[in-house]
Amino acid sequence: MSAKESVLAKAVWQETKPASPAVRNSRKRSVSDFLVYAAGAVLLFIVACALVPGWIAPYTPTEMLTDRIMQPPGGSHLFGTDYFGRDIFSVVVYGSRDSLLIGIASVAAGLLAGGAIGALAGYAGGIIDMVLMRLLEILMTIPGILLALAIAAALGPSLANIVIAVSLSAVPGYARVLRGQIMSIKGRPFIMAAHSIGTPGLSIFLRHVLPNSWAPLLVMGTIGLGTSILMGSGLSFLGLGVIKEVPDWGTLLSQGRGYLTVAWWMATFPGMAITLLVLSVNLIGDKLRDRLDPKHTRG
Amino acid sequence: MHPSRLMKSWQLMSAIALSFLVLLSGCSSGNSQRENQHSTSGGKVKAQGSDQPGTAAKGGQLSFALATSPDTLDPQRTGLAVAVRVLRTLYDTLVIQGTDNDIQPSLATGWEVSSDRKTYTFKLRQDVTFHDGTPFKAEAVKFTFDRILDPATKASNSAQLIKPYASSEIVDDYTVKIHLTTPSNAFLSNLSQAQLAIVSPAAAAKDGEQFGKNPIGSGPFKFVEWQENAQIVVERNPDYKWGPGNVENKGAPYLERLTFKIVPEEATRLGGVQSKQVDAAETVPPQNILQLKSDPNFQVFSINTGGLPYTLFINQENPPWNELKARKALQLAIDVDAIVKTLYLGTYDRAWSPLAPTTLGYDNTLENGVKADVEKANALLDELGWKAGPDNIREKDGKKLTLRYVDGSPNREKRNDIAAMVQQQLKKIGVLTEVTITKDVRSIVHEQSNYDIHGNSQVNSDPEALRNFYHSEIKNMAGRHNYPALNSPEVDEWINQGTVETDKAKREEIYKKVQHYIIDNAVIIPIYVFPYTVAALNSVQDLKFDALGYPLFNDVYIQNKP
Amino acid sequence: MIRTLTARLVSSIMVVLGALVLVFVIVYLLPGDPVFTILDPATATPEMIAGMRAQLGVDRPLYEQFWDYAGGMLQGDFGKSLLNDEPVLPKIIAHFPATLALTVASSLTAAVIGIWLGVLSAIHRNRWLDVVVRIIGLFGISMPTFWSGILLILIFSVNLGWFPAMGSDGWQTLVLPALSLGLVGSGFIVRLVRNSMLEVINEPFIVTLRSKGISERLVMYRHALRNALIPALTMIGVLIGDLLAGTVVIETVFSRQGIGRIISDALMAKDLPVVQGVIFFSAIIYVLINLLVDMSYSIIDPRVRRLNARRQAS
């Protein structure tokens, strides 16, 4: 692992010695616990919005009440109305679907592809490892947003293409972390032992290597979820987003930004929705890291 | 321990302050607009030139924020309207077009047209020099126009505008004969467009491909520098004394310096004027037009452009839109009034005709001729046998009634939002609208012609512009049809007549017939007339606009009101 | 040391060559005919199209195009813009300083805010100030930069009039864009500094220092922070690549010059030589930064030097 990777890993995943129990079992721990619960509640609510928007939203998100455009928050419109006269709260509730979809699908696709490459490289080693890592290194030279921009421009605007664009730029990250984990586990005595008694390679991989490697990927995934949603909104800003009947939050924010001095609520609520979602996911990711890091729990 | 505690609480305070600033800014900026204007006037960001003493001598410097970057400052190569705003300051044209569409002298003092209308003889001004010192002579005219035909120039819009130019003949230093292959009524007004402005032959020959970065013309301002994506600076041409008829100041402009800033982000551009970092900004969104109009510190200009208004073209190639009743149903179901009122808040005019109101031959009897009527629209679709299926979408022979609406990205002039509103309105008559917003209009619309509705507009000086959109000889890149796939021998004939008819009144009548046909047959749905808008500080005086809505800076000076 | 260096250099060159191929593939996949970057599709005749195609050389076989492209790029000839024939490499070089200035300024902002908040967070670990600070750090990561950028313009330009909203001349124009980009980077650094400091706090030598009665503040700033600085600075090196990419959005928001603006404009206009030029250029920069970060890190931190030596031995 190069020096750079070790630092990166440290920011994401604590590689080094655990903090002492004295620090971790501080009596004020409940403050950060409370935050995690709050984050969990926010996340649950957003997921509920995506699953059953009809139960939460008071209006149809596409309904344009052209006689009440740009009404400030309050009264019958919790978040106000936009320049079409749509109820912003309802649009945001329904918009959670595509926003979550962009985030979850990109992370899933990136994890699957990156995980597979990383596992193959880490487990096979040798020439396969070298070739795969070189290829990833080449992919990494092109900054994520540029890659996403070029792909979105090449493939045209659709939700699937944004997912491809965003997930492709995340592949090297996942691949490297999983490879690193596998490399560090591979040499351990219990794996060696399994090999020596003739356990098939795939079985060793599934039963021993993978269970010991998924934790950092999960943590990275939570962080990647936020990054994907932000990158998706960045593409919307640059005019490469998907415009659907019910837009995702990034598109809503991007559409409302020209109205900040006239009707601040149009951009602010979708923006806050994005920020809250990413914030919650990150808080939970932090917590997961504390819980799942084996070196932590040993301490 | 005490000092450290003090330290901590200070750090705490600042951390909280930082977070609150970021969080609450959205609210504070919305509600305290008026109050802000006062605070900025004493702020540290000062407008260039706005501090000039308000003495009798007119002068000052002006910074003007453009919404996009010009592609080149070579008039013959540019394909962008934004470049024209800068080109107008650097170059002159042979003639100019007045606001009532009459053609007036500029670099040409007069002209004669041969009886076959294929030869124009121009007499030229004798007192004009280009910025590089080259005197303006007949040779420059010939050079400029021949240059357009030379493929090495990679001419863009100018290649279209110069048609049907054949050749130039230098009679003497100040007389030039221009030969056309066929007569054209649009030729003179096309000569007034900046893409056909006369360039310095010496400079253009010397700089070749790089002329667009080192532009030399004979205009009221001289080129100083172009910092790409940042600004284009021009300065007063002190020798200028050949100002055209559409400006009062025929001599050197009052402004010493004019800086075009390139600011693509709308909020930033407007923020630049509001914080007085720039003196003026173009393309003001409707919501800000209203906001700034009510503010005594600012003035807002809004000039309707000529040519074709923003129009939804219905592609007749694909059924059922080849049937008049189906298109009529769209015409009745799309509530253009609601669209224009909601999205443009009364700052844009509704369009009624394929031509904009300021264009020659505009037929004002079409105004208020179409009224939204959902019931009638439904009845028309019923007659065609499209019956409501499940989820209220009409069906016929197992096919859903769908309409593919293709629009370009980014959301210029809220055109994507029009698509969103049309989609909702057409739901009421059981039409499923599939909206595609794409960066790649070129391949979807022009190459594959894969659309039922596509919107477009064109700023133009002559009704001849109708040819490119409605004449059946014009084909898209698939070689199939024109924009609306209109194939009407009548319309073709009228457009051909309009090109050669010399009598102005008769010509107008011809174009009125075209306009009536297009609306009566629901070939298109005109939406709005595009106004060129500029927000400026009150210190900016005498900003004027030409017939096509491009700004003229010859008369502008800076004076702060007491 | 020399062997490590050579090995790194060779692999860097291989990566650059790979990027060269990747860039060609990406640009080749972009839809639309480059001919229509110049010609108006509504009016161009088939002859005009064929002529322009020949002039641009896009009618030749693909391998020939690639050969020309690769040969040109490696010799520093990035071609000319389709829109105005401007040579691409000089254009990039002319705009790079503005992007570099923004990247450096936002790295500094990220470092200052990140280290400051990270230290605060570590000192007040697990108390509510820690929680507040960590949330602020997370806010930086959680806000779309174009939104925070516009908010900063509204507060500091329109409302307060402290800093200009646009432009790229003078340090004043750097403040707001660097702040909005730096907030993103600081989020990562807060986390890293906090973790690194907490690691050190329980080392025996710190415990000894504490028992000697040295004040908590001195312990934290003198000893714990010093240990957190190297990883934090390395993190900034790592982040520079991301910050560089972040300029694509921020340069548009603040209407700054720079290569981020160039590429987004070129993508919109389908100006392919510019697109491939900028992507390849940024790939080279990325490789260079990584090389520098790795080398400086192995110079600064003896542990890595030893690790490298061991890797070579095995």
Image (tube, coloured by chain):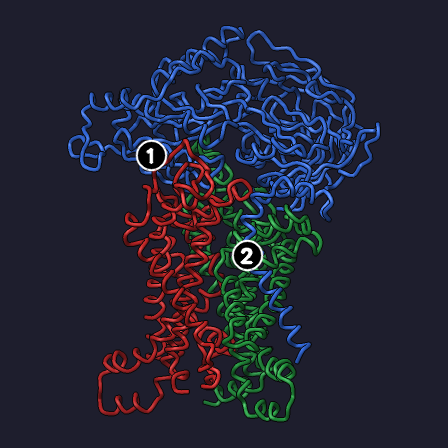
Chain colours: A red, B blue, C green
Q: Is residue B6 left or right of residue B479?
A: right
Kindly report which numbered mark, 1 or 2, lies closer to the viewer in this rendering.
1
Amino acid at dot 1: Gln
Q: Secondary structure at mark 1?
A: helix
Measuring from the top left, give residue B120's x and y in whole percent. 62, 14
Q: Which chain letter goes with mark 2?
A: C
Which residue is disc 2 drawn over? Answer: C72
Q: Are marks 1 and 2 in contact (CB under 8 Å)?
A: no
> Which residue is the extreme one toward the left?
B397
Up/down of A283 relative to A271, above or below = below
Marks 1 and 2 on same chain: no
Chain letter of mark 1 equals B
Q: Quadrant of residue C282?
A: bottom right
Depicted B366 relative to depicted C294: above or below: above
Q: Which secondary structure lies at badge 2?
A: helix
Tell me if residue A62 can be seen. Answer: yes
Of residue C64 and residue B536, the one placed in the foreground of this image is B536
Q: Is residue B104 left or right of residue C151?
A: right
> What residue is shown with label 1?
B424
Seen from the viewer's position, the closer of residues B282 and B308 is: B282
Query: Which image quadrant for residue B403?
Result: top left
Q: Residue at x 60, y 34 (%)?
A: B292
